[in-house]
Amino acid sequence: MKKRIFIVLIFFWAIPSGFAQLKSYTFEEAAQLTKENPKPIVVFIHTNWCKYCKMMENSTFKNPEIISMLNDSFYFVALDAETKTDISFENHTFKFQPTGQNTGIHELATALATLNNQVSYPTITILDKKNTILFQKQSYLNAKELIPILEKTLEIAIFEKNSFPNP
């Protein structure tokens, strides 16, 4: 019995206070949830080999204020641009497109991360409730840079909700 109590105490001691985890959704889940409860979708387009993507994963998306904002007011989707899994979104099935031997890019990553005819990583794309791109940025963003972007997006979403009621 003492051993169990000790293990539980160590478990709670090891978890930092205010520990929160970022909720992540698939595109299919986010699309369905948006129909039920409209919120903007934040898409983080990344690759496994991108060092700036890893930096964002390990700093920006671990920031408690970012986690709170994303969990409360957005649907967050992390999209590996090189995933070979088909993704159904907006009545279309997006697929991996090979560009060479063991290389390629997913069609949905191309659709959401192309800016000035170029795809760069990491890219943050924010979609409104109609899945129209509200914001796109190709670069590393720290929490201090991302917070005002999320706040502005919420202002736009609230304005749209109040100005144009859903049918």
Image (tube, rainbow, N blue to C red):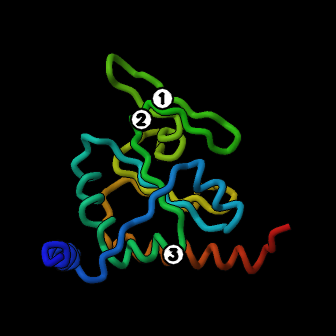
Residue at the limit of the structure toward the bottom, as seen here: 17
- Residue 160 versus residue 126 in the image, above or below: below
The residue beneath circle 3 is 72
- Dot 3 falls on a residue whose secondary structure is helix
Precedes in sequence: disc 2 or disc 3: 3
Labels 2 and 1 touching (C-beta < 8 A): yes
On the image, which quarter does residue 118 sit in?
A: top left
Mark 3: which amino acid?
A: Asp
Label 1: few (<14), some (14–19) or many (≥20) C-alpha neighbours in 10 Å: many
Mark 1 or mark 3: which is in front? 3
Mark 2: which amino acid?
A: Thr
Label 2: few (<14), some (14–19) or many (≥20) C-alpha neighbours in 10 Å: some
Q: Is residue 131 left or right of residue 9?
A: right
The residue beneath circle 1 is 96
Q: Is residue 113 left or right of residue 29?
A: left
The residue beneath circle 2 is 83
- Residue 136 appears in view: no
Precedes in sequence: disc 1 or disc 3: 3
